[in-house]
Image: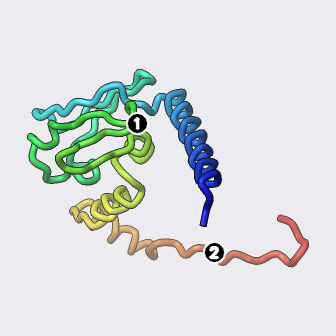
Amino acid sequence: MATKAQLAKAVDSQLVAATAAGKSRLVRGDIATSVVYEPKLKRLHVELASGVAVSVPVSKVQGLAGTAPALVKSVSLAGKGSTIRWAQLDLDVSVTDLVAGCFGTRAWMTTLARQGGRATSDAKAAAARSNGKKGGRPRKAPTQELPAGASA
């Protein structure tokens, strides 16, 4: 079992790391200075400390698709601008993750991409037929392993 001194030391080191991360976000401009829901456009408008503004379709934000506009409008900033928050929905979105992942976490973006890949169209079908006539997708060449100690 950890002593009080060990726990205090662990907390102190976490505070130092969190403070450094916050300063880094501020330098990069990943801190939001304002966030507003634009109901006519169905978008969030986020102003960053860097001067960059991001306008995000609400339907693309993880956890907001299909949410009533009145609830989306209740958006606020938390964590000194590091988080966009909807208290009524118990939903928090990291500003850094929103900007880095465009509209959500890597898993959410993968889900959106998978949905897009399932979409069908006449153009997509024609391209697939054309590629099939050429022999389909080229096979990947097998990789050859080098003998131990050899360099490429």
The amino acid type of the residue labelled 1 equals Ser
Disc 1 crowd, CA 10 A, few/some/many (<14, 14-19, 20+)? many
- Considering every residue shown, the one lying at the far right of the view is 149
Disc 2 crowd, CA 10 A, few/some/many (<14, 14-19, 20+)? few
- Vertical comparison of 25 with 146: above or below: above
Q: From the viewer's perspective, is 28 left or right of 51?
A: right
From the viewer's perspective, is the residue at label 2 or at label 1 nearer?
1
The residue under label 1 is 82
Q: Quadrant of residue 56?
A: top left
Q: Is residue 126 visible?
A: no
Q: Quadrant of the N terminus?
A: bottom right
Compute the Cα span from label 2 to label 1: 46 Å
Q: Residue 22 at x, y = what percent?
A: 51, 35
Please name the residue shown 58% across and 36% down the image.
Answer: 20
Query: What secondary structure is marked by label 1?
Result: loop
Please name the residue shown 54% across and 27% down the image.
Answer: 27
Please name the residue shown 31% across and 39% down the image.
Answer: 84
Q: Residue 114 at x, y = what percent?
A: 33, 64
- Considering every residue shown, the one lying at the far front of the view is 4
- Vertical comparison of 149 with 48: above or below: below
Q: Quadrant of residue 140?
A: bottom right
- Vertical comparison of 107 with 14: above or below: below
The amino acid type of the residue labelled 2 equals Ala
Q: Quadrant of the C terminus?
A: bottom right
The residue under label 2 is 141
- Vertical comparison of 47 with 79: above or below: above
Please name the residue shown 21% across and 37% down the image.
Answer: 75
